[in-house]
Image (cartoon, rainbow, N blue to C red):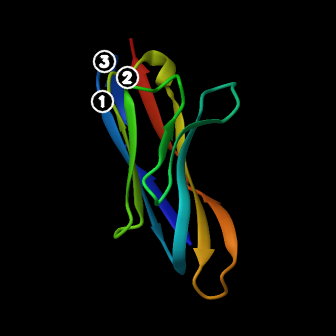
């Protein structure tokens, strides 16, 4: 299973970015799909999660500004980030829980991370 995350960059405060994470490989099921972030000198934190049933969760710090979504036909998870703030600056990682179609085993996978920098 491979994850390709992209969409990060440098943006001014108040701006927006859309992150994408494409999952490929021997996939039977992906649940959940999550976005984490890690700012310099801080622990990695959960930003948002999406379950195939349609349930979503967002961290309090991003509620109303960020929206997670997923396209099950493309095995892709997105994070729409609006009204970005300098404190959103971090490396963003996608994380997926995948059931292997070959043997039914579940395993977590991490993307390589994409840097989001928000200038004030």
Q: Which mark is residue 14?
A: 3
Which residue does the image show at 67% across and 87% down from the upper left? 103
Instruction: Indicate the position of residue 19 as horizontal and vertical percent values.
Output: 38, 45
Check disc 3 and report its element: helix, strand or loop: loop
Q: Are marks 2 and 1 in contact (CB under 8 Å)?
A: yes
Instruction: Indicate the position of residue 29 as horizontal and vertical percent values.
Output: 53, 72
Q: Quadrant of residue 120?
A: top left
Residue that numbered label 2 is attached to? 84
In whole angstroms, how far apart are the C-alphas of marks 3 and 2?
Answer: 5 Å
Image position of 24 with respect to 49: above or below: below
Image position of 15 with respect to 109: above or below: above
Residue that numbered label 1 is attached to? 16
Outermost residue on the top side: it is: 120
Which residue does the image show at 33% across and 41% down from the upper left? 18
Q: Are marks 3 and 2 in contact (CB under 8 Å)?
A: yes
Q: Quadrant of residue 118?
A: top left
Check disc 1 and report its element: helix, strand or loop: loop
């Amino acid at each position: 299973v491979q994850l390709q995350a992209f969409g990060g960059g440098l943006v001014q405060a108040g701006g927006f970015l859309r992150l994408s994470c494409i999952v490929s490989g021997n996939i039977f099921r992906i649940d959940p799909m999550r976005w984490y972030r890690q700012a310099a000198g801080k622990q990695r934190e959960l930003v948002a999660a999406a379950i195939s049933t349609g349930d979503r969760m967002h961290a309090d710090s991003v509620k109303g500004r960020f929206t997670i979504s997923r396209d099950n036909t493309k095995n892709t998870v997105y994070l729409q980030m609006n009204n970005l703030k300098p404190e959103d600056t971090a490396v963003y990682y996608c994380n997926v829980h995948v059931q292997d179609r070959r043997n039914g085993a579940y395993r977590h996978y991490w993307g390589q991370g994409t840097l989001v920098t928000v200038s004030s």
